[in-house]
Amino acid sequence: MTGKINENLSRRKLLGAFAGVAMLSATPYYANAAGYLKGAGNIRKVNLRNQRTGEALNTIYWVEGQYIKPALEEINYFMRDWRQNATRNMDRRNVDLMAATLNLLDTDEPFLVLSGYRTSRTNNMLRSKSRNVAKQSYHVKGMAADLRLGSRSVKQIARAGVSCRSGGVGKYYRSNFVHLDCGPVRSWVS
């Protein structure tokens, strides 16, 4: 009987320790995290949809401090310049910013990606049609995304992006999208 009590106590202690570790690992750790990680958590994922290509991507790309290379490769392909069918490694900071922003918005809806990576050729073509396209665009560097959500306003998405304090956040009310980039911290309205 004594053996069973000790075994049960040991099992309880062990289960308690596992529960404690599970609680700690499920709690986001911010003490040493950069601003763009705030809100992203210990498991980071992106949920994206591209209306032009018909593609969708809902993937975990980071677990407990480690980026998952195959997931990043999927993200790079998804965020490609679909006009030129050209890919580039997207800056991980911007992927983190998108993940944190979506997480802060508390929705299961995927971001609709209007633009991710752009070749110089595509960027120049878009510049010829709109004064809102920058000559030195962060899109060309793989550091930006233009996004929208059906269930959230431009103002709500931008507020979540700004709260990450991790780059540029542009509000484009007439076109109904938010620009997120991992360049210098700034915000604007167009």
Image (cartoon, grey):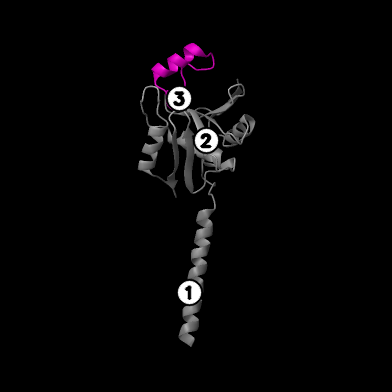
Q: Which mark is residue 139?
A: 3
Region in magenta:
117-140
Q: Is residue 11 visible?
A: yes
Going 49% across and 40% down the picture, which residue do you hit? 47
x and y percentages locating residue 16 in the rendered image: 52, 68
Going 46% across and 85% down the picture, which residue do you hit? 3
Could you tell me how far apart the alpha carbons at marks 1 and 3 are, in whole angstroms? 54 Å
Q: Amino acid at mark 2?
A: Phe
Residue 123 among those drawn in magenta: yes
Query: Which mark sits nearer the N-terminus, 3 or 2?
Result: 2
x and y percentages locating residue 81 in the rendered image: 40, 25
Whether tag 1 and tag 2 are in contact, CB under 8 A, the answer is no
Q: Which residue is mark 2?
A: 111
Going 54% across and 58% down the picture, which residue do you hit? 23
- SS assignment at label 3: loop
Q: Quadrant of the C terminus?
A: top right
Q: Residues within 10 Å of mark 1 (few under 14, many from 20)?
A: few
Could you tell me how far apart the alpha carbons at marks 3 and 2 are, in whole angstroms? 17 Å
Left-right relation of 78 to 13: left
User: Which residue occupies the extreme top position in the image?
Assistant: 128
Q: Is residue 170 visible?
A: no
Above or below, 6 against 171 in this view is below
Residue 164 among those drawn in magenta: no
- SS assignment at label 1: helix
Nearer to us: label 1 or label 2: 2
Q: Which residue is mark 1?
A: 11
Q: Residues within 10 Å of mark 2 (few under 14, many from 20)?
A: many
Q: Amino acid at mark 3?
A: His
Q: Which mark is residue 175?
A: none
